[in-house]
Amino acid sequence: MTTLVTNAARLTPIAVELRATLTLAVPLIFTQLAQISILTTDVLMMGWLGSAALAAGALGANIVFMQVMFGFGIVMATAPMMAQALGAKRHSLREVRRSFRQGAWASIAIGLGIGAIVLMSETLLLTLGQNPVSAAQAAAYAHALIPGIVPLLLFMALRQFTAALERPRPALIVQLAMFVFNAGANYVLIFGKLGFPALGLIGAGLATSITNWLGLVALLVWVMRDRRMRRYHLLGRFWRADWPRLAQIFRLGLPISIAFVLEVGLFSGAVYTMGIIGTAELAAHQIAIQVAATTFMVPLGLAQAATVRVGLHAGAGDAGAVRRAGWTALLLATGFMAIMAVTIAAARHPILGLFLDVDDPGNQRSIAIGATFLIIAGVFQIFDGGQCVALGALRGLKDTRVPMLIAALGYWAIGFPVGLILAFPLALGGVGVWWGLALGLMVVAVLTTWRFARCTRLGLLDGAR
């Protein structure tokens, strides 16, 4: 009797959704962790060059990262389009192929545009009031990242395809291989090993660009050889335009991109504000934000799973399943981030020791400031995880415009201004900036969660109003 009850419990809709979400999300989470580990490795090894190099690297990375996230937003619009086509089961092979193709077109065009803007990095940083020496070093690092931007966006397009098919394993394996290669290439090119010259920050950028190209080729070969994925013929008639579909990608993707840019811009604005406050604050901020970004990969993977699961159920017209998919991912994300908040606060000093030499007197101020930043990071990342998954669930409903407006309100009408007021008029410095970040994320988390609840209650399953 006990066995029968247990088996019945396993077949409840909530249990089925939980298992499906975790089956999809866990590989996506590890893929995201492997991806962020590439940047973490860059930051870690730049820290070995000293806090000044780390500060310059932070500036350069932010110039590129904010623009790349804009491209990611456009590309990510293909995931709900493909998922809803698969859920509806109407001409899914053709629909998925066409959505991927136009997503790839968008990736190439946007990547080239980003590269042109990154060439002006030094001028942009000087305009933002950054130290001229740091601006020059940051620009050199950013320029070395340019060759890897287009392949990175195309790699992301392939990842959307594998996720929509609920086949995330290939992307995970390739991303892990990219992490290992990038770590080795960093060590060789930054510090001049195996007969190569020591290129410093430029070496870190070149290593990442090479890694992005190798990752794209590896994942493309895998997709073209896999029995279940090659039947979509992703590169078939790649030159053929589908202008209405491309317009739909931009219509759905632009609000996602703007929301991403608003969020990344909030953190980039914090970086530039720290640069004005002081080099020690900037170095400490980069470490704390890198730690928070690493734990954030878990809710980000859950958000991607929520987009696919919600999209599949929405395509099938199952409102109850849509609700289960969204709330399951949301509860998993906030629970995990609450645990991480306590862990980071308790281990803040050992964490800082991974990035900076604690015995170097020149690093003591950065370490002291970073310890405080990590405590606040533990608080705000709970809200960060919640808003991320809520936004992912809304993307599964093709609801992107209102979430963009919510992001604008929370990040820039509330979060950033409050951070500046706390930092300067109230003289809290970098600590004030971080509390502003926390407030902005909290507002967005609350409003996007309410938005998802409202849309599912009203049965808005395809383009919420």
Image (cartoon, rainbow, N blue to C red):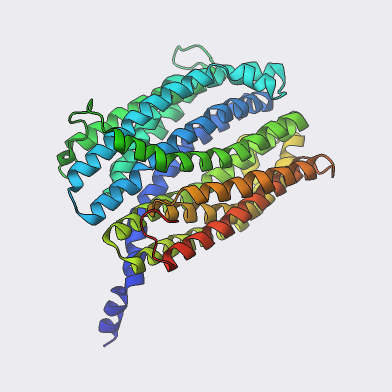
| 280 over 316 or under it: above or below | above
Taking the view exactly as shown, the residue that stands out farthest to the bottom is 1
Residue found at x 39% / y 65%: 459
Q: Residue 386: x and y, percent?
A: 53, 57
> Residue placed at 74% from the left, 32% from the top?
280
Q: Quadrant of the C terminus?
A: bottom left
Q: Which quadrant of the figure has residue 316?
A: bottom left
Give coordinates of residue 250: x percent, y percent.
40, 37
Locate the N terminus by quadrant.
bottom left
Residue at figure coordinates x 57%, y 17% from the top left: 120
| 113 and 360: which is toward the camera | 113
Q: Residue at x 53, y 14 (%)?
A: 198
Q: Is residue 284 above or below residue 145?
A: below
Res 137 visible = no
Q: In the figure, 256 relative to 152: above or below?
A: below
Q: Is residue 203 left or right of residue 176?
A: right
Q: Nearer the viewer, residue 308 or 55?
A: 308
**278 with respect to 222 (left or right):** right
Where does residue 60 sit, x and y in percent of width and height? Answer: 58, 25
Residue 166: % across, % down: 28, 51
Label total for image: 0
| Residue 193 visible (yes or no) | yes
